[in-house]
Image (spheres, rainbow, N blue to C red):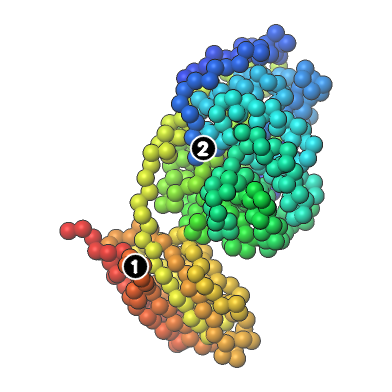
Amino acid sequence: MKRLAVLACALALLACWPFVNLVPTPTPTQAPTPTQTPTITLPPIVGPDPSTRVAAYYYPWYGNPDVDTHWVHWEEGGFTPPLDISSDFYPILGAYSANDRAVVAQHFAWLRQAGAGVVISSWWGRDSFDDRALPLLLDQADRYGIQVAIHLEPYSQRNAQRMLDDIRYLYERYGDHPAFYRTTGTSPWIQDERPKGLFFVFAPGYAGENEPEVQAEYWEQTLDAIHALPDGAILVASTTDCSWVERGHFDGLYNYIHVHLEEENVFNWSRCIPSGAWYVPSVIPGNSPNRIGYPEDLYEPRRDGETYIAQWEAALGTGVQPHLVAVTSFNEWHEGTQIEPAAYGISNGRGYNYDDYGPLGEQGYLTLTRQWVDRFSTAEWPPTPVMRLHLTTTADWTSLLLLSGGTWLQPETISSSEEATVAAISGSRINLNQPLDRARGGGQVELVIDVGLLDVDPDGVLGFEIQRGSIGWTQVELFSLTAAEPVLVATTTWGGIAGTDGLNPYSFSLQASSFIGAAEP
């Protein structure tokens, strides 16, 4: 529940072959009995291999008296397991323990059935409950052909040095296990193809639980040190602020959860992720944290699977190919984002009737996930034309905007003046700033940046606008990169005063075919 509070805070600041059931479904007023616990007979290893391009967040933080001597996590919030638990849904396996071999085996059999080849396991620090659960988790993952990545939660004193030391610890203790996930993928900060661990950093805006807020730059030296470890690492951060890649040296970004998909462009943060950085969208089947007292605006109904379908469509529909799609979640029962099978017709014995998956059935989300895994695995993303922009200014600030005719995405900074205080892309705006005193003295700064072009009609027109402060001038050179060498298409210089809002706008347009080639006849 501690992680849940951080998530609520983060969401507020940022505004996710049938097997025979091992456990009979409990009756509405009957708690699971010892005779209903999973047997030592493990589910078979069947079906096609799962995809390592699809992951699911996994929570090994559940415990019960039969296995762990006491309840862990099911009771938080004042509930009384085994039948009364802190969730809007009830697991078909009952209030289980993450240290029960049969339960974990069933989980991984279901994950294999769903096609998810990676779990991202919640980790709250050394010797935490979930740290002690990892050996069993890794062994069962290996049995079912699944890999395990690590979700670095904002555990107590998760400061920069501690995170470096803990990643060393994770490598030393678990790094040789065959199920410990490694990737040869690269990023702007780590270009070699060593098999590297994959780490998700939740709530990077905090140094740790009950610790102060930090900026992206706080992590820069630590991430450089982690990248330089013998094993290296890929670290992705739970933020949609794309500047964290450049400022914090993170290798990519993930969102963990987006509710209210009807709000426009919720996955379009992918377009500002720098070229080569990891885009890891997280898709949810719904979000139902009512029983644990989350704000009502965080509720997202499942709509009989339609929410899940819409999430997948949006995550794959931005024009940016994901490195990995992560399902939020396999078994986060408190927030009600789980795809793990839920029981039907269950009451807590005190007047509360648990929700279920409606007409989809108990295993419906496993089937839906497999369908989307197959669709994602065969999807194709067309090549993205790239244009080069060279901005030079003597103003204290200037911006170049793409107003119409297309969208910029995946910027790659080629060079930037050391004196530039801001040189970044945000949506369809590129900003280049320098200190005001320096601009008043005639100082000049430059930025060269490559940007992809999306949703462009080859026979259409691209509309641009220069904005700048009232000091000095701005020059923009635009290059086509369709040939072996950059070809200068146009040069525009603007040093005038226009309008009354202080933006001094100047608009111009160019044929899109100058950058992407003419349309086929």
285 shown above or below 183 = above
**Badge 2 or badge 1: first in the primary sequence:** 2
Judged left or right of residue 64, residue 390 is left
Q: From the viewer's perspective, is the residue at label 2 or at label 1 nearer?
A: 1
- Please, what is the three-letter code of the amino acid marked with disc 2? Thr
Q: Name the residue under label 1.
A: 484
Q: Is mark 1 on a helix, strand or loop?
A: loop
Q: Which residue is drawn at 54% across and 74% down?
A: 416
Judged left or right of residue 486, residue 397 is right
Asked whether the viewer can see residue 367, the reply is yes
- Please, what is the three-letter code of the amino acid marked with disc 1? Ala
**Image spot of residue 130 (x, y percent):** 73, 34
381 shown above or below 114 = below
Asked whether the viewer can see residue 354, the reply is no
Q: Mark 2 points at which residue?
A: 52
Q: Farthest residue to the top: give it.
A: 35
